[in-house]
Each structure stands twice: as C-alpha cells, then as structure tokens.
Amino acid sequence: MSTLLHPEITTEKDFLPLNGTDHVEFYVANARQAAYFYRLGFGMRLVAYAGPETGVRDRASYVLEQGKIRFVLTTPLRPDGEIAEHVRIHGDGVRDVALWVDDARQAWKETTRRGARSVQEPFEIKDEYGRVRVASIAAYGDTIHTFVERGAYRGAFLPGFRAMPEDRLARPTGLRYIDHMVGNVGWNEMNRWVDFYETTMGFSLYQHFDDKDISTEYSALMSKVMANGNGRVKFPINEPAEGRKKSQIEEYLEFYHGPGVQHIAMVTDDILYTVAKLEEQGVAFLTVPHTYYTEMEGRVGKIDEPVEELEKLGILVDRDDEGYMLQIFTKPVEDRPTLFFEIIQRKGSRSFGKGNFKALFEAIEREQAARGNL
Ligand code: FE2
C-alpha cells in the first residue's frame, strides 16, 4: 500500500535549513560533448566554464542552466584521480547533489555531528566577484552532497569559473526547476538511507510505496520519498524487491556498479510543449501501449489536455485526491542503462504517479529485454 503522509511543513527546529538544490554535478567521460547534448537536446544554456584556460589543470567543467535547474558537467583531463576513477567505475553519472544553504559551516557541523561522513571540510573560495563557502558530506554509493553558501556572490557560478557569452546553440524547452531526485540503493538498504536522511539531515518520510504498489508480473521495487523541512528538496530512495526476473533497480546497480542517482525529475508548466520540443531535439522517451489511453479517462476522469495529444507524445497521467499530474520518462541518457530523466507537470497532485507504475515498469522491462538484461 502507498501512504501519502505530507507531514506539516515547518521550518521550526530545522537543523539543516535548505534553500533548494544549488546544482547537480555529473562526472562524465567527455564534458564538451555531453554539454552539447544537454544544450541541443534538453535546451540548457551554457553559462560558465572552468578548465585549463582558466588555470584549472586536472579537469574541465561546463555549467548549464535552464530556469532554476543548474547542471555542472565535469571531465577528468588525466587518467588518475577521483574523477577518472568515478567515470571508470560508473560511466557518466551524478557525483554531487549540491544543496543551497545560508551557512555551509553550520550545515557541515550539524550533519557530521549526527553521523554523516565528511568528504570536504568547510572552506572558502574567492575571486573578484566575491566569496563562496562550501563543504561536502557522503551520501549513498559514491554520491555526495555539497553545501553551497553563496552569500552575496555575484559571479557566473563559483569563484574560478568564467562566464560564457550568450549561448546561441541552446534550444530551451520550458524546463523550470527540479521536482525530485531519485537514488537507487542495494538490497535491504532503503531503510538505512531513509534513516540517514532522517537522522543526519532532518528530512522526514513524505510517501512510501511497497512492492505491491510497484510490481509487474516479473519484477518489483520498493520506494520511500524523503523531504526536507520546507519541502523544497525531495529524495525518493528505491531498493530492488524479489520478483521472477531481474528488476530495473538491479539492472541499474549492475551497470552503475553500485548505488547512485537513478533519475532527475524536472518541472514544466506545459508538458505538451516541452515533450514535443524535447522529442524534436532528439530526446528519446519510453512509450506505453494504446490501451493505456483507452482506459485513461475511466481512471483519471476529466483533464484539460486532449488524450490524443498525450498519446502522440506518450505522456502519462495520474490523479489523487488533490488533483492530477502528467509525467513522462526518457530512456537512459547514456549507453549504460543508468541515469534517465522525468518530465513532470503538477496540477494539484503532490504524489509520484503510483497509477502509472505498472504501465511504466512494463515499458522499462521491454527495454531491459531488448538489452538482454531482464
Ligand atoms: Fe520520479
């Protein structure tokens, strides 16, 4: 059974107040080419850069933005070191889910005091545009959370980054901000990470789904959604559950070689426009069978969007007692079947599309089977 908890949103006694997601940093094998994909495919603008030309010797980083979404694509320039090792093991993937705070020292102190492993003690970086304080802690797998305290910093991204001229390659798609970011963890590890977010980061359980909610004939998974005090940051955590065949979470864990970020959900105010544009720009989505749409009105009732248009694009709809939501999932965005994206538009509903799980997982299983991994 799924439970919708929506704990009362309160900032009282929140020992880790978060303003939101600051950025998501990916370690990739070739950041220049990956940046091209996100600019022309997803419509992100290249706004800042750091690399050999700016005095950085071991890496190159491209900062991309659309709405409030900020991605940093970082590639190693040498065969040794932490970035090259991350790419060797995981392929392209998310290294850092960085969180925007008012006080990075305090965030680091409160979380490490409660058991988080420190990755980087608080330190300050400066340039002519001001100063920023950062500190990092470890999360699941090789994923980390960096606390970014920007204060009155006026530069393009972080000290040391160079602002880029207006991006004339980017083709915006109407993506606005991150709704949630999902982590896949190993067998029987979900509760351990739920406990981590609860105890060391002050998050609380927002919704949970068991293997009855999320199962098909072949495979199953369990999921708990954790949210921070003001509800701006939501991290669902998935673990595989026993099924007749290999679940998508197991496939991820095998190819990512451990726990990591499974998908990033990005919000649009006009999903028909956004998905049509993304598709035209080469982003590939999962599709569901025609019967999903013939049964849709009976399941979700009246909605504003014409069903034929939703079907043409493969957009899914789900309703709960607060309203409805529209969502669609891309295929994995790299050759390893690991990270993918979700595009979501909320019309009242604050849930995660439970009514779509079955259709969706069957679509994923068809892809798994095509890869020989089911
Ligand atoms: Fe999602």
Image (cartoon, rainbow, N blue to C red):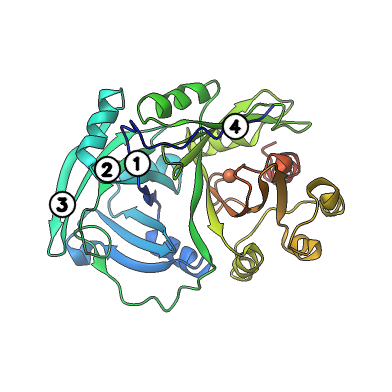
Q: Amino acid at mark 2?
A: Gly
Q: Residue 217's spot in the image, x, y percent? A: 79, 31
Label 2: how many Cα within 10 Å (few below 14, some 14–19, many 20+): few
367 lies left or right of 148: right
Q: Residues within 10 Å of mark 1 (few under 14, many from 20)?
A: some
Q: Counting residues from the N terminus, which is met first, the one under dot 1 or under dot 4?
A: 1
Asked if the residues shown at circle 1 and circle 2 are in contact, with their CB atoms under 8 angstroms apart, the answer is yes
Q: Residue at x 40, y 56 (%)?
A: 71
Which badge, 2 or 3, comes first in the chain's sequence? 2
Q: Is residue 45 visible?
A: yes
Q: Earlier in the sequence, mark 2 or mark 4?
A: 2
In the rendered image, the quadrant that contains the N terminus is top right
Quarter of the image holding residue 136? Answer: top left
Q: Which residue is more in the foreground, 186 or 191?
A: 191
Q: Which mark is residue 125?
A: 3
Q: Is 263 on the left or on the right of 325, as rendered?
A: left
Q: Residue at x 22, y 64 (%)?
A: 155
The disc placed on residue 81 is 2
- Horizontal placement of 86 versus 353: left or right? left
Question: To which residue does mark 4 refer?
Answer: 250
Q: What percent of the width, then of the height, locates residue 284?
A: 63, 59
Label 1 element class: helix
Name the side, left or right, on which 291 lies relative to 310: right
Of the numbered discs 3 and 1, the one sitting upstream in the chain is 1
SS at badge 3? strand
What's the CA distance linking mark 2 and mark 3? 22 Å
Which residue is disc 1 drawn over? 85
For the residues carrying marks 1 and 4, which lies nearer the camera in this image? 4
Q: Is residue 337 above or below residue 309?
A: above
- Mark 4: which secondary structure? helix
Residue positioned 16% across, 61% down in the render: 55
